[in-house]
Amino acid sequence: MASMKDSDTGLWLHNKLGSTDELWTPPSIASLLTVSVIDNIRLCFSSLSPPVKLKLLLGMLHLPRRTVDEMKEALSEIIQLATVDSEPWVLMVADILKSFPETGSLNLDLEEQNPNVQDILGELREKVSECEASAMLPLECQYLNKSALTTLVGPLTPPVKHFQLKRKPKSATLRAELLQKSTETAQQLKKTAGVPFHAKGRGLVKKIDTTTPLKGIPKAPFRSPTTPSMFSPPSNRTPIAPARTPLRKERGVKLLDISELDMVGAGREAKRRRKTLESEAGEKAAKEEAVVENTTPDYAAGLVSAQKLGSLNENPLPSTSYLPATPSMVPSSSYIPSSEGSALSHSNNTPQTPTPTNLSLTRDQMYAAQEMFKTANKVTRPEKALILGFMAGSRENPCPEQGDIIQIKLSEHTEVLPKADGTGSTTMLVDTVFEMNYSTGQWTRLKKYKPITNTS
């Protein structure tokens, strides 16, 4: 600490004593004020802030008498520098501590001699006169804060509790809150109520008066056989005046004919069926549009939808004929050669025509292609693009060295077929092949059967 510079000492003191939360100097400062620290403080005292100067001067009171005697000259020089300071409080504390290093006592004869002390005491008297509530407290309370007073006189004795106020239980408080909330809710409902209407229309259930006769049944008694019938000539009848005015709304029980009830029920049923059919038709149309607007696969990127661009090259869906999946004759010791496949489907396209520039598929052709590719597990994407192009009308043979007929393997699966003699069954490997004839423009799907194992 002896080698500490002036600037370092000032910064260190500011960190230790510069806090404004505690304005009084704690007794622990005595351990910090060593001989080397006091020598450095003497050199940098004028550059310190007023709170640090005040705490440093008041900290001298916590030093032991032996330490004060050892540093008497340094402490007296620091107090001498404080007596010429511009801060009134620093100047007053320096005047009080002027005789402390020599005699160990404080200089209290200042009010008549120093005008600075008189001004400070006048300000304090004004502050203390405002605190009339401190009349019952110790005299030091007017000058000391709570922590300093506790340090001086010790902890305050808690007041004796002579009685206890009786409070309402928590349930009563909750009940009052709930009542208040329900009242506020009722008031809000009254404010937001709808347009009032007549009281007669508020009740849906109306009590039936059984004392009055039914309004739909005539009040006159039934006619006797001798009474003139309604089918008699008009001359024999007398007009009956209406019982009420026609403008008045009729009330009471109405008698309806059974045929009228059937007509009302039939009309409602027809209206319900019509709504159901309309909703089903709308859903079906939406599904068809969703299928048509479906994203085109990447292997059909070169084809244009015929529904979007119009009928550029409309080819009707070729009529397809299917043969039974099980051959009529399967010998137990022989199999159908792979070159001889049973025709599954063929197209009736017209003979070869010039390849159109814009290729398109109709909706039916798109559906047929999707169904065909759904079960295809051996065809590749380039082969799919080739098949779609041929179905759309492309007649450019990509492999002329193989001839006009090109076969593409679509799928491969196994089938268990019974033998012709009925003695057992045999497992066959079935290859589905798509055959394209570029000379005639016809395409066919074939199935080729190969035996795998025979089981009895």
Image (cartoon, rainbow, N blue to C red):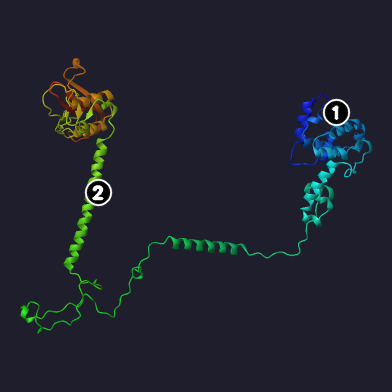
Q: Nearer the viewer, residue 214 or 133?
A: 133
Q: Tell me the quarter of the picture where residue 80 sits.
A: top right
Name the residue nearer the viewer: 204 or 236: 236
Residue 137 in view of the camera? yes
Q: Amino acid at mark 1?
A: Asp
In the rendered structure, the answer to whether residue 372 lies left or right of residue 25 reads left
The N terminus sits in image quarter: top right
Please state the total of marks drawn on the protein image: 2
Of tags 2 and 1, which is closer to the observer? Answer: 1
Q: Position of residue 307 (x, y in %)?
A: 20, 33
Secondary-structure class at tag 2: helix
Q: Quadrant of the C terminus?
A: top left
Q: Nearer the viewer, residue 384 or 366?
A: 366
Please tell me which residue is depicted at 59% across the width and 64% down the height of the picture: 172
Amino acid beneath label 2: Ser
Task: Name the secondary structure under disc 1.
Answer: helix
3D distance between C-alphas at marks 2 and 1 = 102 Å
Kindly identify the residue that appears in the image at 84 percent across and 43 percent down: 117
Which percent across, then down, holds residue 313? 16, 28
Q: Which residue is mark 2?
A: 279
Quick check: marks 2 and 1 in contact, CB under 8 Å? Answer: no
The mark that comes first in sequence, 2 or 1, is 1
**Residue that protrudes farthest toward the top in the picture:** 401
Foreground residue among 433 and 69:
69
Q: Percent from the top left, x then y, of residue 133?
A: 77, 56
Residue position marked by numbered label 1 in the rendering: 39
Label disc, if present, on residue 195 of the rendered structure: none
Dot 2 alpha-carbon crowd within 10 angstroms: few under 14, some 14 to 19, many 20 or more: few
